[in-house]
Amino acid sequence: MKNFIINNARIVTPTEVIDGGGIAVKNGIIAQVSGSPIHDDLPGFENLDAKGLILMPGIIDIHTDAMDYEINPRTSADFPIDVAFSELEKKLCGAGITTVYHSIHLGYRDAEFNLCSKYSRLQVFENVYAEARKHTMINNKIHLRYEISGKEDYDLCFELIEKGYISLFSFMDHTPGQGQYPLDKYLLAARRRGVSEQEAMQELEMKRARPSISKEQIKALACFLKDRNIPIASHDDDSVEKVNENHEMGISICEFPINMETARRATELNMSVTGGASNVLRGGSTGGNLHARDAIAEGVMDTICSDYYPPAILHSIFMLGEHHVLPLNQAINLATLNAARAVNMHQSTGSIEAGKDADMILIDYSNNFPTVIKTIVSGNISSKFSLKTNRVPEFSNML
Amino acid sequence: MKNLIINNASIVTPNEVIHNGSLLVENGTITFISRKPFNSELYPFDCIEAGGKYLLPGIIDLHTDAIEVEICPRPAADFPIEVAFRELEKRMCGTGITTVFHSMHLGSREYEKDFRSKYSRPEVFAKVHEACHKHSLINNKIHLRYEIAGLNEYELCFELVKKGSISFFSFMDHTPPEDLLHGEKFEKFRIRKRLSREQAIHEITERMQRPKITKQQMLDLINFLKDHHIPVASHDDRTAAVVEENHGMGITMAEFPISSEAAQKATELGMDTVGGAANVLRGGSNLGNINVQDSVSKGHINILCSDYYPPALLHSIFILYRNNILPLHESARLTSLNPARAAFIDARKGSIETGKDADMILVDYKNNKPVIEKTIVGGNISGEYSLKPAKIYEYYN
């Protein structure tokens, strides 16, 4: 492990931006953060000149569905899981993510149908966990997202938790007619894929008739998780009542609330409220639900995750800063310190503060476009990029 | 532009692997390849100690659909095109691709329907073309893949070529085959698309009856492309007869031949034949078509492209080598010199040889898995990657 000093950076801490600051990293830990340059002649320390670039904490992504798509980019086209894992974490590293919670579904028949994978769900969990324990570029953890109509997989949740695979858990309910798909939106989507209203209603009745696990079973699982200090999230909450109920059960994260009242209630209850960075970057929800940016401006959303597009986090942070929705340091907190708090990791990572892991990214923010130059994980420079300085000369044989 | 020395690499040239080889890069060009290390103290160059790792020619990907998915990863979820472009080329850089031909569809109602993008096709072409010419990590070009049922877009093909946006062209014909209307294939299609029997039959027959551009229009376009030195490929050829017909019209490349007889015929006619690296990595086609590893071993496929999974290319090079299908320098040619020739860029690209652009990748191959350490494009180290040392993490406070 190399020790190093970075001087001449714009260091973003949870509360301010320090221009021309310096930091020292020793044994993978931030040893010192200083408002002025640190002496660069310490023995055994390498010196890096940040040249005025932004040094911010590495992004913590508590929900990204990318892993299942990386393993199965097309229906029934499965790739080796070790290849998918390494290639995905390299991509995430390049997007400035230093800790990821791969959200992997269980009990979710529609998602299984879409992937049509040769791997069983258990195989996916086992292999991803095994890869996460090897030498990696970033910190990889598993977020189990459980669809409550997957009754057959209820016991498997306990097994996976028992084995130590799971670092974050969420309960999902994708039954149409509520949550992410209120009736009108469900019917619109059906019409788009050429299905008549009558057929759509039949399908809806079929899905509604699917038995889910009971309230008691949800509570039992929630207790089991709490005993093991595994944070629990709910998903697509659409009403104040649901939030109250979830809070009662010990759920501490409200993921992708559908409307402002829900997000506000969760904030009042001191829950972490998580929205999609894709939503921020695109300027709204594809399903026509809550605008994450509005919720952030209202102060009722404190965390963003990548959802389905990992690069979105970094771009949305700078967009929020640029549009004065939040000062830059607070926009950065959304995907770093606040995310770390949501998953109980804030004592070891999530901000540039002495004593924490040296998980940091160096960003060139010019022409309103953030470019990741270095991604540092526990003091290791896991990836480093440099744009070609010259325009590429044409290289066709005919020239 | 910096000058570079790379010492003690296993250099993969078109004809051999030079162990403990070294090379010089000056002003972005490979100027010297040696079988002995250079004394780095004698040169005012940055020096990379390769420690015996493989130095391969940078990968040239003639066909990847990734840009469309990056712009619109879910139906109707469009992202800013510049963001998508930058993020995608960063990902490709990390997979060892140094020159990419982003394949972008035109004239396909099916793709347009799948993506439901807010961007018009001309808008996507214009924005990607613009991004290709800015500062970038790798070399980016556009491959226009034109669906011949897109009558309204026929003229646009000419316009885009005149604007200089297009560096590679392919003709696609996704007319459903007769047998899709019956038996198992029909059932699979219907279930996948979540359609009733009637709806499925309606959709398939409608697509079968769509008018296409005429043979004469196709010939005119091919000749126009040839005049502009743009390589032309066909797509998904089913039979030897189709391949012969395409060849007769002046098409020089067969992309994704569906059957081994089609691949064999194309090879016999001296055409370049392109297979999907995703197929190699997965060990077969997900649609039950040819097995590309077999076709490569028979000599019927001479180029690999990433198709829909960019990381597949690097892994495929080493899979073909590990499975004793080809020696390493030959499997590397499938992703470098052969595509460079097919795309008319081999004067400057496609191999580690003196006088060529320094587009190279440094790869650590261990435990049967290739890991990219550096991607060098025109002598610039565009991407560097490193695994962190093992550490046991305290997961919770």
Image (cartoon, helix red, strand yellow):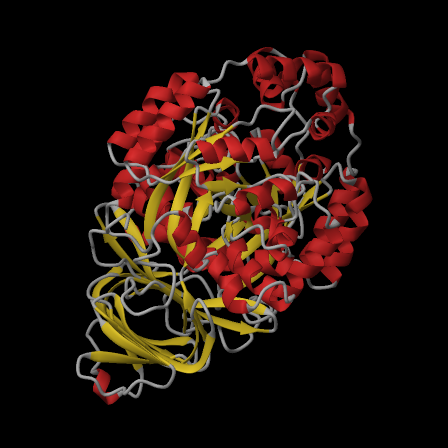
- Residue drawn at x 40%, y 20% is A217
Q: In the image shown, does A212 or B157 lie closer to the viewer?
A: A212
* Quadrant in the rendering for residue A153: top left
* Quadrant in the rendering for residue A182: top right
Which quarter shows the N terminus of chain B? bottom left
Work out whether residue A4 can be spotted: yes
Work out whether residue B2 can be spotted: no
Q: Position of residue B338 (x, y in %)?
A: 45, 53
- Residue drawn at x 59%, y 59% is B83
Q: In the image shown, does B71 or A397 lie closer to the viewer?
A: B71
Judge whether A123 appears above or below B98 on screen. above
Number of numbered discs: 0
Left or right, A126 with respect to B136, comes to: left
Can you name the residue that lies furthest to the left here? Answer: A43
Judge whether A230 appears above or below A369 on screen. above
Q: Position of residue B395 (x, y in %)?
A: 27, 48
Q: Position of residue A292 (x, y in %)?
A: 61, 50
Left or right, A69 with respect to A350, comes to: right
Q: Position of residue A124 (x, y in %)?
A: 35, 32
- Residue drawn at x 82%, y 43% is B152
